[in-house]
Image (cartoon, helix red, strand yellow):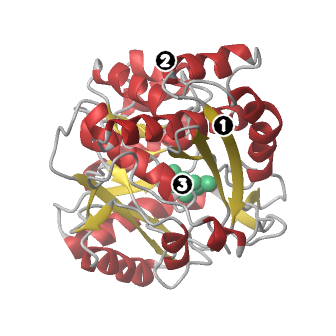
Amino acid sequence: MKIIDAKVVVTSPGRNFVTLRLTTDEGVTGLGDATLNGRELAVVSYLDDHVAPLLLGRDPHRIEDTWQYLYRGAYWRRGPVTMAAIAAVDTALWDIKAKVAGLPLYQLLGGASRERVRTYGHANGRDLPELLDSVRARLAEGYPAVRIQSGVPGLKAVYGVHGTSVDGSPVLHQQARPLVEDWDTDAYLRHTPAVFEAVRAEFGPELPLLHDAHHRLTPVQAARLAKDLEPYRPFWLEDCTPAENQEGLRLVRRHSTTPLAIGEVFNTLHDYQTLITEQLIDYVRSAVTHFGGVTPLRRLFDFAAQYQIKSAVHGPEDISPVGMAAAVHLDLAIHNFGIQEYSGHTPLTEEVFPHAYTFADGHLHPGEEPGLGVEFDEELAAAHPYEAAYLPVNRLQDGSIHDW
Ligand code: CS2
Ligand code: MG
């Protein structure tokens, strides 16, 4: 079998998605997600100009060899653009292999280790009453765990909290220039324990509560927050520091038993080396889409498992249903699954990418269709072309840029 076509499509059914479709001479097709939020067209060019020409004529069954060819062969390794492009190829090849086998992808990954995949949803509020309403809404939708993010008194706009859509999910897209948000770490550190206290008081001790600090704290600030949150038993504290400084997590760990989750911006296993081998985190957060595909993510999970670290695949709205399907197949198959982030997609996105995976009672299942179980309606996609869109930037009160 040979690859005869590699087509990259960028569409915006509510937000931008980059999709790769590989076609073989036997008519089998495979899909991959290459969406890099706010930098989509860089990946389109990487795929169109530098990857697609190399794929024509290759045997789609040689997934490992193709991955190594694209990763090692480029000489310029790693980085989000490169790894999103390789991820799309790897995912599309797994889709093809599983379709040829007539099996859902999870069967090729070892078969199901569980019946279904536990998720968490997002609750956001500009103030506490709004946040409590948002938690109530997520629980009514069946979510068994909830991430809580709140506005901070004195700050005008906090990421993911202000500008929330009707269902409570953040509106991050459709900004032709990055929106400017403000930040004050001391105010945030004072307020966040009170947020947990209010949510615990309302919903009791059992509900798993997560919180995302979006890389904004120094190690000593992160240590203080992790310690202050301990009485409320968070399920995890996410991205508490910019983890390029992996050693910084030693300080956080030394001061607190609050579980830590990191990795949504990482793109190779090397980014995790110290964090995993020194057991400085509890959950790895990478997505298939940004980590080079199903092949390396499976390796990351197996490596993490040796240190009792679990998976928690990144699953915001900017992972397309193709990337989400790949995640859910992995989640069902691996032993050290932890939890899956799931925000769902707009109804139009669901129409562009009809899929076999299902969400019911707060749990996902990949379905039994051969391959990933996702279709791509290219005609509908073409009716919703790319729109320039950026994530917000973050400034301190003196006007200087802060960590995102
Ligand atoms: C967030 C994301 O889901 C998360 O945990 O950190 O919403 C993230 O901000 C976006 O994926 C950025 O594109
Ligand atoms: Mg996050």
User: Residue 314's x, y, as percent?
Assistant: 46, 48
Q: Which amino acid, by three-letter code, is at mark 1?
A: Ile
State how far apart marks 2 and 1 are (Cα). Answer: 41 Å
Answer with mark 2 or mark 1, whichever residue precedes in sequence.
1
Density class for disc 3 (Cα within 10 Å; few <14, some 14-19, many ≥20) is many
**Numbered disc total:** 3
Density class for disc 2 (Cα within 10 Å; few <14, some 14-19, many ≥20) is some
State how far apart marks 3 and 1 are (Cα). Answer: 27 Å
Which of the two residues, 195 or 95, is positioned nearer the viewer here? Answer: 95
Image quarter where ligand 1 lies: bottom right
Answer with mark 2 or mark 3, whichever residue precedes in sequence.
2
Q: Which amino acid, by three-letter code, is at mark 3?
A: Ile
Which of the two residues, 327 or 153, is positioned nearer the viewer here? Answer: 327
The quadrant holding residue 137 is: bottom left
Which of the two residues, 151 or 244, is positioned nearer the viewer here? Answer: 244
Helix or strand or loop: what does disc 2 sit on? helix
Foreground disc of the pair 2, 1? 1
Residue holding disc 3: 319
Residue holding disc 2: 274
Q: Which mark is residue 4?
A: 1
Residue drawn at (42%, 25%), measured in percent from left and top? Answer: 300
Residue drawn at (31%, 70%), measured in percent from left and top? Answer: 199
Callout 2 touching callout 3 (CB < 8 Å): no
Mark yes or no: residue 163 visible.
yes
Residue 321 vs 6, above or below: the answer is below
Label 3 near ligand 1 (CB < 8 Å): yes
Answer with mark 3 or mark 1, whichever residue precedes in sequence.
1
The quadrant holding residue 187 is: bottom right
Mark yes or no: residue 242 visible.
no
User: Residue 57's x, y, as percent?
Assistant: 67, 26
Residue 32 vs 390, above or below: the answer is above
